[in-house]
Amino acid sequence: MKISDLIERLQDIMGEEGDIEVTCTGSTLPDDHGKRGLIVGDVFETTVENLIVRQDDKYEGRKRVRLYL
């Protein structure tokens, strides 16, 4: 999702619901755990703590904003 789309959707929700908390699903497992055959249920709900711009080979060198929990 592009930043502009995220902002638009959040503004729509804020207009309907007010300035409510935004949470997301997180996990203590590494990003590639599925590729290594690990099937472990370790998921929780948390808030976003930081937004970091990253660029690496994982996404073909494209920049992205990563939400850190």
Image (spheres, rainbow, N blue to C red):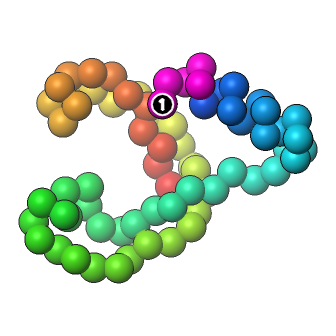
**Viewed as shown, does residue 19 lie left or right of 29?**
right
Q: Compared to 37, does 68 lie above or below?
A: above
Q: Compared to 38, does 23 lie above or below?
A: above
* Nearer to the camera, 36 or 66: 36
Q: Residue 36 at x, y = what percent?
A: 10, 66
Q: Residue 11 at x, y = what percent?
A: 77, 31
**Viewed as shown, does residue 48 lie left or right of 64?**
right
Q: Residue 45 at x, y = what percent?
A: 56, 67
**Viewed as shown, does residue 59 lie left or right of 13?**
left
Q: Residue 13 at x, y = what percent?
A: 78, 40
**Viewed as shown, does residue 61 lie left or right of 50?**
left
**Element carrying mark 1:** loop
Helix, strand or loop: magenta stretch: helix
Q: Which amino acid, mark 1? A: Met
Residue occupying the point 33% across, 22% down: 63
Please, which residue is most extreme toward the left here? 36
Which of the 4 image quarters holds residue 42?
bottom left
Stretch in magenta:
1-5
Q: Is residue 16 magenta?
A: no
Q: Is residue 3 magenta?
A: yes
Q: Which residue is mark 1?
A: 1
Q: Compared to 33, does 50 lie above or below?
A: above
Residue occupying the point 44% across, 31% down: 65
